[in-house]
Image (tube, rainbow, N blue to C red):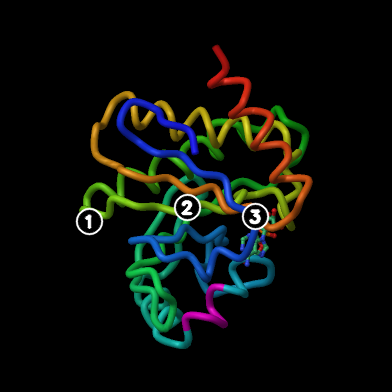
Amino acid sequence: MYLYNKTKIYIVQGDITKMEVDVIVNAANNTLLGGGGVDGAIHRAGGPTILEQCKKIGGCPTGEARITTAGNMPSKYVIHAVGPIYKDGRSNEESLLYNAYYNSLKLAKEYELKTVAFPAISTGAYGYPKNEAADVATKAVMDFIDKENFIEEVHFVLFSQDNFDIYKEILDNKFKG
Ligand code: AR6
């Protein structure tokens, strides 16, 4: 655990659908109608009420986020955030990924959700290099904490060992000394 201002930041290796937090974040696509990866896992674990709500919302632009309840999962809500598809690193990917994290936390605050779990958005099917994505994710979260004193816990839930190791190295470095 890392303590940043008053917010606890955790890195966890595992399945985000199992997290007992107020809200888990999904790595969704513009349609919000489900897909593979963490999106598929969330819709499977949460059940059909999530898709029903997503259909009513009607989509989400890249870099933004929308909220539904969490169906059968232990969390209360799901924030569906849309990260960028990685092209060449010069197509606004960094600010779109940053915004996906930052806007998710804004929405969590709006709904008074104090404990939040994130996956590594865009690092699977969307091909964002994992190291760079982890830099952006940790920066966006820490910037939000700097500006808005609200979130109590942020959990970065990494499915793979390599992504866990990347986050550990980045956070150890940020917090050393
Ligand atoms: N818990 C936590 N992380 C997971 C889980 C899980 N259960 N399953 C996979 N991951 P991806 P993207 C990790 O592809 O790159 C979908 O089809 C995975 O190892 O899920 O943002 C959507 O509908 C990877 O590190 O999301 C979109 O069309 C990370 O989650 C598209 O994929 C993100 O991989 C979005 O692509």
Element at label 1:
loop
Q: What distance separates the C-alpha of mark 3 from that of mark 2?
A: 29 Å
Find residue 98 and report its horizontal and vertical position in percent: 51, 35
| Residue under the image location 65 percent in, 37 percent down | 167
Report which quarter residue 38 is drawn in: bottom right
The three-letter code of the residue at mark 3 reads Gln
| Residue under the image location 70 percent in, 48 percent down | 123
Q: How would you rate the neighbour count of disc 1 (Cα within 10 Å): few for under 14, some for 14-19, many for 20 or more?
A: few
Element at label 2:
loop
Of the numbered discs in the image, which one, if any, rests on residue 4? Answer: none
| Residue under the image location 64 percent in, 72 percent down | 35
* Location of mark 1 (residue): 111
Q: Is residue 157 above or below residue 77?
A: above
* Location of mark 2 (residue): 61
Find residue 10 and report its horizontal and vertical position in percent: 50, 44
Total tally of numbered discs in the picture? 3
The stretch of residues the image draws in magenta is: 42-46
Q: How would you rate the neighbour count of disc 2 (Cα within 10 Å): few for under 14, some for 14-19, many for 20 or more?
A: some
Residue 145 is left or right of residue 41, and the answer is left
* Location of mark 3 (residue): 13
The three-letter code of the residue at mark 1 reads Tyr
